[in-house]
Amino acid sequence: MDTLSVRIEPSFDSWRIEARKLLEGSVPPDAVLWTDSSSTQFDLFDSGEPPRKKQEVKISKSYLDLARTVSCHSSPERWGLMYRAAWRMVCNGEKNLLQRPTDSDTRKLLEMAKAIRRDCHKMNAFVRFRKVGEYPHTGREQFVAWFEPSHHIIEYNASFFIKRFTGMDWSILSPEKCIHWDGVKLHTSEGVSKSSAPDEDDLEELWRGYYKSIFNPARLKLKAMQAEMPKKYWKNLPEAELIDELTRHSSNRRDDMIKAESLEPRPAPRNLYLQNLHKNNQDFVVNEPGTIHDKSLDELAELAACCRACPLWEKATQTVFGTGNPEARIMLVGEQPGDEEDIQGKPFVGPAGRLLDEALADAGLDREEMYITNAVKHFKWKPGSANRKRRIHDKANRGEIEACKPWLVAEVMKVQPSVIVTLGNTAAQSLIRKDFRILSERGEVNMGNLIGFPGKIIATIHPSWLLRIRDEAEQQAEFKKFTADLKLCRE
């Protein structure tokens, strides 16, 4: 087939229309050259029409949602990547492509989608509205903000600001596109220069005063701050002019705060429920009466959100408690939340979680019917290198594992599963014994510390271990072993 040059508007809807025509004609991705009106690439081939309809096109909603997000990426390769993945699912029979995080196309799509979510997060955090007036007859205030995104997210991310600032009229200006909310409808216009946005308003001084009052010199971490608030955004933040002064004098302010503290020790907070939970964390009986039966899993999750039994809560975004079927027969216990789990507040939603989904599907198990949690409920991490902004996983120590164990025990007592699957050494050492080693003892094991637990425990590797294997053949072999371990749950 001759190469088709397909020129579209740089939007998901435009791509979707043309992609459907090509899929109906079963046009392979290598035969399509995608360009959009924002591209400087010239058409090298004459445009042509795809063949008449041959293929019925059915694409899952989950892929369309993913593609809609990826379409906002700044890479000109996104259109071809999106079509290639759709062609593989529709024309090549790879319906479970998105459940294979090790596939190169799936990985690129997920990385692009993550970049878009990150850019939206920055926009939500660093847009600063400035008041420019108000309508005399309605009293509605008018605000304008300036933002320079890394990707094409201005209109895509507008819903956040509509929900947050419904009661005022606002505009967000950017070099590529501008959005305007009038209280009823969102309008768009062409991009403008930064000179069109106001530099300051009457509330600026109040904002700087608020930022100065909440700045805590004792918790200053410059590298972490710059990773979360890159300098490219400082020029639009009224508080940015205070950062240099506050950081330079932070050590003096910290010393003054320490001197001002009372020498009298503060009494430890009393929480009898948590005391009972820790008291029973070693030897428990599933049907033993007590305070644990007075709490639902949701109530346990609320209590765990206030846990200060170890220092991990200080750097974590939130407590990541278990989720799933509260009456599950199978309970999966991982090690600790990762970067994405810490942000979303749910276990196994990152790359390891997607690989787990693939393994569960191969083992004939339904994740929706399970209860999934972690042995440690907070993300322990360390900063990456200067050119690597992602937070790096750091292994929980014995004290942190023991501090979190009461919550895991409480979950087991409430769910009362028939089978517990421990994923990784941390989970196995928390529930079985402290010196347990997965690679030499994997499979069905004795109950260990879980006295009174009537079911069985299956110990296997954590899916993140598979992602670290570089050799593809070795990775596939270990994946099959992992799937075989999961199949033991059905026996």
Image: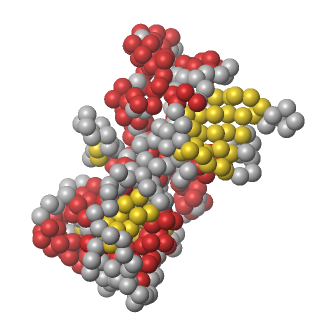
Q: Residue at x 49, y 72 (%)?
A: 17
Horizontal side, residue 248 vs residue 128: left or right: left
In the picture shown, does residue 191 fall above or below 417? above
User: What x and y, as percent, mark residue 477?
Assistant: 15, 73
Q: Residue furthest right?
A: 137
Residue 364 to residue 452: above or below: below
63 or 488: nearer the viewer: 63
Is residue 341 or residue 155 the one in the foreground? 155
Is residue 389 visible in the rendered image? The answer is yes
Q: Quadrant of the N terminus?
A: bottom left
Q: Position of residue 146 (x, y in %)?
A: 55, 34
Judging depth in this view, the residue of 85 and 80 nearest the camera is: 80
Image point (17%, 72%), residue name? 476
Where, by quadrant of the figure, is residue 91 drawn? bottom left
> In the image, 96: left or right of 173?
left
Q: Quadrant of residue 465?
A: bottom left
Q: Looking at the image, which residue sits at the far bottom?
A: 54
**Numbered-mark total:** 0
**Residue 217, above or below 22:** above
Q: Quadrant of the C terminus?
A: bottom left
Picture layout, residue 26 above or below residue 458:
below
Q: Nearer the viewer, residue 318 or 14?
A: 14
Residue 181 image-quadrant placement: top right
Q: Residue at x 74, y 47 (%)?
A: 183
Image point 52% across, 30% down: which residue? 194
Q: Give the x, y percent position of residue 123.
A: 51, 41
Residue 7 location in percent, x, y? 41, 64
Residue 320 visible, this angle: no
The structure's colour scheme is secondary structure
